[in-house]
Structures are given as C-alpha cells and as structure tokens.
Image: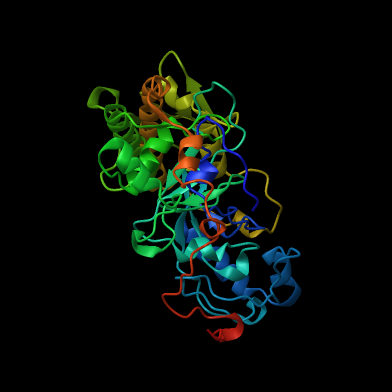
Amino acid sequence: MPSVPYDADAPLLADLMPWSVAPPRLGRGWPTAPDAASLKARWDALMKAEGPDREALFEPTRSRTPHSAVGQLPGQDSGTEKLVHTTGPCPEPVRVLLAPFDEQWLIPDHRLIDAARPELWRVADERQVFVVEAAAVRPDSGEPLLLASSLLPLVRPGRVRPLYRRPGATEPNLAPGLLDHLADRLGHRPDPLDVLAWTLVAVRPGLTVPLTADPELWFRGTELGRRVLWLMRRDGQRPKLPGGRRPYVRSPLPSRPSTVHYDRDEETLQVDDGRISPVPPEAWDFEMGGVRLLEQWFAVRMGGAIEPGALELIRPATWPQTWTSELLELVAVLTLLTELRPQQAGLTVTDPIAAAELQTAGVLPVPDSARRPASVLDHHEEGPEGQFPLI
C-alpha cells in the first residue's frame, strides 16, 4: 500500500487499527437462526434429503454447492467431506452477531458459508473484541459509528477490525508504536482496551479518531467508552434498567406473534395481544442506517415471506421464553446507550495528538505487515476431505 501524506487532522481508524477483514458472507440464510434447535432440525432435514432434493435445499451459489471441497473452520469440529456425502450430526451451533445488536446462532461449517474469513475464526476467543464499522449512518443522528462484540460478527457491509491479532490477547491490532507514544504523552501506558474504549466514543464521521494528550480527558473518555463497550458486548453482568424503569411482560406474548406496535403515550410495546412496559421511547426510536432495531429484531423472529419448502421455514412452533428475556435486555441496552449520547457529544478533544504528530514520531504510516493477518497456527487445520496441509 503506498504511503500517503498526513496533515494536522485526526488519524484514521484504518491507521490506528490497521488490520481489517471483510465480514463473512453466508450466501444463504438457513444456517443462521435466533435459536439453536431450529438449526439442528434444518440440518437433519438436509441430511434426510438426497440427490437433487438436497441440492435444492442447500441453495447452491457459485461459491458453494454440496459438491464443494473446503477445509475445516479454525477452532470448529465440523466435517470436511463433501456435503453431498455427509450423513453425520449437526455441528454444534455457535453464537454470532448477525445484525447490529442482534445475537443469533450459526452452524459453524465451512461448507455452508460462501466466504467464512478463516482469519477471523483463528483469532476468535473469549478475550477477543471485534470492532465493526457501521454502515450508512446518517449525519448528526447519534447512531453508533462503530459496534463492538465478543462474538464473531456477520454484520455487513462494514469492515471488521479485531482488537487482537492473535488468540489470547497477545498482540494488539494497533499501529506499532502507538501505545508507546500515548504513554509518553499521557504519562501512563494505556492498555489496548483503553484505546478501544476511547475510540468507540471519540470516533467521528469519516472514521477519524481524535486523540488527546490530556490525561484527565483521556480518563473521562475511556471510562465512558468502557461503559459503551460493556453495553455492546454484554459480557459478565447483564445490563438492566433501574427498578422503576425496568420493562416487564404485563400481558403474555402470543405463541406466534404477527404484529408489533408501540404506544408512545403509554410507553408500551404491544405484540398482538401481549404487552411489555415500560419501554422507553429511546429504545423504540433507536435506529442504525435508517432501520429501527426493535422492529427489525421482531421481524426476524416472526418470520417473513419465505419460499415454500425452504429450510428457513423450520423454526420454533411457539415463541420461546428465551426470546422474551433477550428482548427485555435489548430494550435496556438501547436505552442506556442512548442516555450516554450527550456525554459522547460533549467530548471535546483538547491537546490533540494529530496524525502529523504520529507521523513525526514514526507511528504513521504503519508498515504493510500490520495490515495483514498475523501468522496464527496453534494446531493443524483439517483440509478438504480430511487432509491436513503440509506446513
């Protein structure tokens, strides 16, 4: 990549976190679902089908057919024989971030995924944080420019930037020398999660990230960013609204809901005859890319127009209780994130560390090697038809 001149403006996210990967591309919808049981039932239906019936159910593309020979996904135990010959059980589904703030399940089988991005799977572990560039954010909308998740993200079309280049959080995906330069300017050495926390709240349209040498401002920004990061990742203690504002199911949700309506005056979410309240307007109005997230979340789970005979028609016969719990948590997350927006908007950077300063310090431009994945080989990865590559 040719070097480019840097002016006095804020550095680009693409330079601060230089290694990025396009998000995985599935090519078919049926290997993902809001519940794991449906995925296993879909797999069983595929295994029972033979010949042209299996081919049709699979939904072949130019990249994948039941005759494709591909290797195993890193860290997964799925088979590698051609799917046309497969008879075994479903690989254990894994949790993924399928859409903004929408955690679902995926069959982690390379044979089902057009472009799986194995380099992302190699660095996915309990300490990884994936940063996703949000798409089509409206100016001055307050919508997040970045998402962060501990789960492998399938959110399209923005780039995915892992915080760490290797498993075990051993090599941060940061411009070489950045942490040293920040340590010199701030008087203490931040860790990679601090840099990520600051980035989440300081990032600006155009994905520039103003940095500061003001230790007090840095501390306030990273504290705010840690709160945002916790809400987005939902790791450990689960987010909840205070007692008087916490939503509850006032009337049971129907077994197969078909409509969702929000009563702004009553702060009530009406799901057919079911009622959930209080649901703050901030949660209902939370949008990304012009899409109201709660409406999208319901639309996926209620099912839409699906071609007859498709595997996606296999879904829960009744509304699972776990979906209601996930919904209540999502309402809390969206509400709490909205309440942090004024603090983010008020984060005015003083004593800036400009891109030109980073260039003078030798931090920028980053070497080409920092934009490529690290060499990660903790174990042999099974190739097509059970073969192991020669190293």
Render colour scheme: rainbow
From the viewer's side, name the closer residue of 361 and 188.
361
Number of numbered discs:
0
The residue that appears at 55% across and 69% down in the rendered structure is 109
**As drawn, 39 above or below 220:** below
Q: Position of residue 209 (x, y in %)?
A: 47, 34
**In the figure, is residue 290 to the left or right of 39?**
right
Q: Residue at coordinates 43% horizontally, 13% vertically from top-left?
A: 265
250 displayed left or right of 142: left
The x, y position of residue 364, in whole percent, is 51, 46
Quadrant of the rendered image containing residue 279: top left
Residue at screen point 67% across, 49% down? 306
* Quarter-of-image position of residue 66: bottom right
Residue placed at 69% from the left, 59% from the top?
309
Q: Position of residue 75 (x, y in %)?
A: 44, 70
Nearest the viewer among 62 and 275 is 62
x and y percentages locating residue 221 in the rendered image: 33, 30
